[in-house]
Image: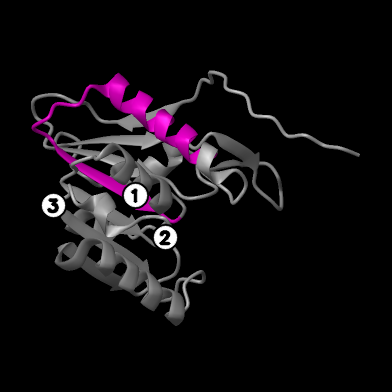
Amino acid sequence: MNIIEREISYQITNTYSAANVLNFKTKNVWFVCHGMGYLSRYFLKYFSDLNPEENYLIAPQAQSKYYIPPAFKHVGASWLTKENTKAETENVMRNFDAIFENEQLPEHINLIVVGYSQGVSVAMRYVASRKIKCSQLVLMSGGIPKELEPQDFDFLNTKVTMIYGKDDEYLDDERIKKESRRIRDLFGDQVDIIPFEGPHMVNTDLIQSLL
């Protein structure tokens, strides 16, 4: 059988979640990219302890949704897979573009970009691709995309924080050493690496300490 795979383009509609109110009291805007298996509205709950008057939260939603095993009752989502990654990445970038266009964020506000787990890859790719001059880039328990090079971040002079749990079931010692070398190669002295006691999780205490 001769199978031909063709590519098409079409417009889709997606959601994203926001919390608190963006106004003259707002000091920080958090753009937070969830990990695999999350929905954006639930992921925002990890940031609920932040002062609501000073912090406006935006969580993009991964487009590829699925039922989570074993019960197949709850819904999660995934950003990317190894299948057709380049095209799918561009879809995610355009998703993020549409969010920023819709939000019309003031230029003077501190923009904090956060990626957790699988969200690290899309957060980093977006900052690099669109030259996002964020105030902070926070990378939690995720892998750095292989294609990114130091020159991709030449424009960025900001604080970069890498956070991971010492008991993370997805990170052995060799992987931690590899990712630590990679992030220092990309950002040099801008990087602060913070390990914590715990598994693969969002550490809400460390979120507070970022401000």
**Residue kind at label 2, given as amino acid type:** Gly
**Crowd band around label 3 with a 10 angstrom C-alpha radius: few (<14), some (14–19), many (20+):** few
Q: Position of residue 17 (x, y in %)?
A: 39, 30
**In the rendered structure, does residue 55 fall within the stretch colored magenta?**
no
Mark pair 3, 2: CA separation: 22 Å
Sequence order check, earlier mark of 3 and 2: 2
Q: Which residue is mark 2?
A: 142
Location of residue 179 by image quarter: bottom left
What numbered label is drawn on residue 157? 3
Tag 3, which secondary structure? loop
Tag 1, which secondary structure? helix
**Snapshot colouring:** one colour
Spot the residue most to the right.
1
Tag 2, which secondary structure? loop
Q: Which residue is mark 1?
A: 124
**Magenta highlight range:** 88-117
Q: Is residue 152 visible?
A: yes
**Residue kind at label 3, given as amino acid type:** Asn
Q: Nearer the viewer, mark 3 or mark 2?
A: 3
